[in-house]
Image (cartoon, coloured by chain):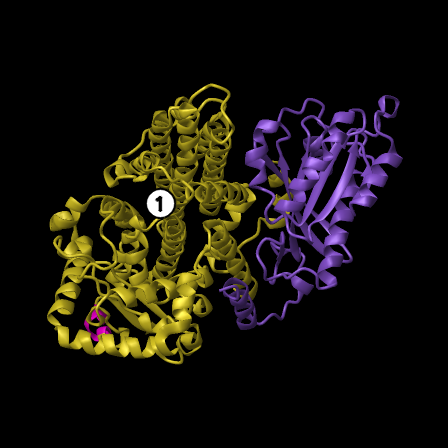
Chain colours: A yellow, B purple
Amino acid sequence: MEENKVESEEEFESAESDSEGKVLEEQSNNKLINNKQTMNTDQASDTNTSQSDAKQTHTEEAHTDTTQTHTEPAMSNAEPTDTDTSTNQSHTGTSQSDPGTNQSHAGTNQSHTGTSQSDPGTNQSNTGTSQSDPGTNQSNTGTNQSDTGTSQSGTSSWSWGWGSITSTLSSAVTKATEYTSSVINKGGEEEEEVPTPQEMRRESTTDEEREDQSIGGIFTGLATAVQSTGASLLSGGLDALEVIGRKTVDIISEGDPGLRKKRALLTGDTKTLSQLLKEAKETNNDNNNDDNNQENTSSLINYSQLIEQHGGLVHLEALEMLSGDCTSKLESIESESVNDEVQSLCQYFNIEEEEEEDPGDGKEFTNISSLTIDRVKADQLIKCHEDINIQAKEEVDKDIEVLYVESMNGMARLCSSSLQLFKKTSEILLIPSDGESIDVKDVAMKLKKITVIISNEFETIASLYAEKINEKSSEDKGQEYITSLYLEASSSSSYVQSAHKLLLPVLQHRLTITINNNNN
Amino acid sequence: MASGPYNYSYIFKYIIIGDMGVGKSCLLHQFTEKKFMADCPHTIGVEFGTRIVEVSGQKIKLQIWDTAGQERFRAVTRSYYRGAAGALMVYDITRRSTYNHLSSWLTDARNLTNPNTVIFLIGNKSDLDGQRDVTYEEAKTFADENGLLFLEASAKTGDNVEDVFIETAKKIYQNIQDGNVDLNAADTGVQLKPSASGGSGDRKPTGNQSSQQSGGKGCC
């Protein structure tokens, strides 16, 4: 906590929340190549061609996509085998994958759509429309394209294994930021057709509702747009897609024969979540320095900076180091039976969709103190949660800016505190036990519960504040705040869930120690 | 310019190591809060502190990892040495055993950090001169033989505490100036803040991006 005091003056400064382009770009580069390698060429569609199909509905699409970002992690969790080789995905924006070609696309802004709802039997198909960006964020958005496909592969790659999970997750998170920022830009332009973030949020929470088209005009419009896009894409024919696919390959391999550089990039992708966070923070900062337009309200807060300010980043870094060391120790396991036992722990590290969607009540949170392992106290986390709730329920008249800053700070604090709890848990787990035995499976089960409770809480906080902001202002600014509020709530959940996954090798290592002790 | 969120040019990672009860956490607390913490609880695993200092006109953010001294945490804390630019190795001048263990701590520090990591030996509790168990000269000889920087300090009075942290930063900064630290390499414990270097307001975003890219991808 000390660092907070020291840093707070230095670092609490406005920054754009929508400028994590660099990280995203690198991530998407890598992922795109991955897609490239695993999917048939006819699955890629080029933005230029799909433009005509999607243009008339682009506003709705952009919003659909935002709602998508909230549900995606859960969906992919529920389907761990749904890797990016699935056949019904189509990806756009692939031409952006080469850093060398980026500049020529600067100044364009793409919106993306995920339309899994249009056909429950198929996987998602994505379209992107390319349009000139009337906003001031060209420098950001210019680097943010090509994530359509990535988002899919990123979040559906849970079965890959460790390293990729953290990086893909965080890339999904950064992407989520981008989607919303493009929505924000558009939100200002075409107000009439745009549902409020809260409406979008409601729609995204339940899939049943999506299918039930009687919800309201806005939603019907959305669903229709989504369906027609999907249908037109499919009926557009494989021929067109094949052409597009070939073209995409050409563009991707331009100046990079054999895709050598991109393959190198892919294999060299060992970035950890904390590194990505750091880069995101710096990129945000850079862009903020460049951007003298302080009118941009979303620049009030840089969430990754807040996470650092509250100590979350360094806790995450420490956790990654422990987790990494445990992973390398696990590699030397020779006994098959031990290996089976170790692998059996993986089952406790998949957060199912329904669990994640389970709405938490405030009381549940205090239960965390009974779920932590001995000697790890959840006091700080629970105190933090209480503080946020007290603050959120204050009957004081606050400006929406104040509410916004307050909510973001609260979430960042809760997130950092959670990361700290996981780090401490790892440290205690790795102390050589003096005779006492730890039931590793029990710990794993409880950690999963903790993760679900915390993940849900971010959403609760966001809703709490969104309601307050909505009461005060239904103008663009308020909606903008609400959008980024939900977005960062979703990011926070992702951070916590990524950190949770870092505990797997730690628990596995602990288990091997226990087994060895029992054998001796 | 000064109002920028990152008005420092570098981040240096420090790690504080040494036996239990030598005053590692108190040194950190004195440095970051300028206060003496009388009843300091045992550190579990690692705790953190930060402070921004100025060296040769450059603002540097020190990110300090304060490790647990208890033997049972040794396996855990060994994971944290990696990437430290500075290692503060602390013993208690009133307890000889803490001095005798230094060679073991030094072995860890040498093995688990990189060759450029600056190691600073600190004889803490210099205010308790009456109970001294290790002479200054003896420790100084040990430090010289092993190429360590050395000072006696007191977390209680604050004597020399500032100097220890700043001298380490100076030495690290010197190493950077001499070209001994590759800022693009991982695990040097030094991060350059491109956005804040030189405090220039005329940075070209494109140039900045490419430098970040080379930092991120150059290792591939």
Residue found at x 17% / y 77%: A240
Amino acid residing under circle 1? Asn
Hey, which quadrant is residue A269 in on the image? bottom left
Hey, which quadrant is residue B161 in on the image? top right
Q: Is A368 one of the magenta-colored residues?
A: no
Write the start and end of the magenta stretch as one range: A50-56
Which chain's residue wears label 1? A
Q: How many marks?
A: 1
Q: Horizontal and vertical percent for residue A233? A: 16, 68
Q: Is A9 placed above or below A52 here?
A: above
> Horizontal placement of A74 versus A520: left or right?
left
Q: Nearer the viewer, residue B199 or B16?
A: B16
From where the camera sits, is residue A220 visible?
A: no
Image quadrant in which the N terminus of chain A is located: top right
Q: Nearer the viewer, residue B59 or B147?
A: B147
> Horizontal placement of A75 versus A388: left or right?
left
Q: Horizontal and vertical percent for residue B20? A: 67, 27
Q: Horizontal and vertical percent for residue A388? A: 45, 33
Q: Horizontal and vertical percent for residue A157? A: 30, 52
Q: Residues within 10 Å of mark 1 (few under 14, many from 20)?
A: some
Q: Main secondary structure of the magenta part?
A: helix
Q: Nearer the viewer, residue A266 or B128?
A: A266
Q: Secondary structure at mark 1?
A: helix
Residue found at x 13% / y 56%: A119
Image quadrant in which the C terminus of chain A is located: top left
From where the camera sits, is residue A39 visible?
A: yes
Q: Which residue is mark 1?
A: A470
Residue found at x 61% / y 45%: B112
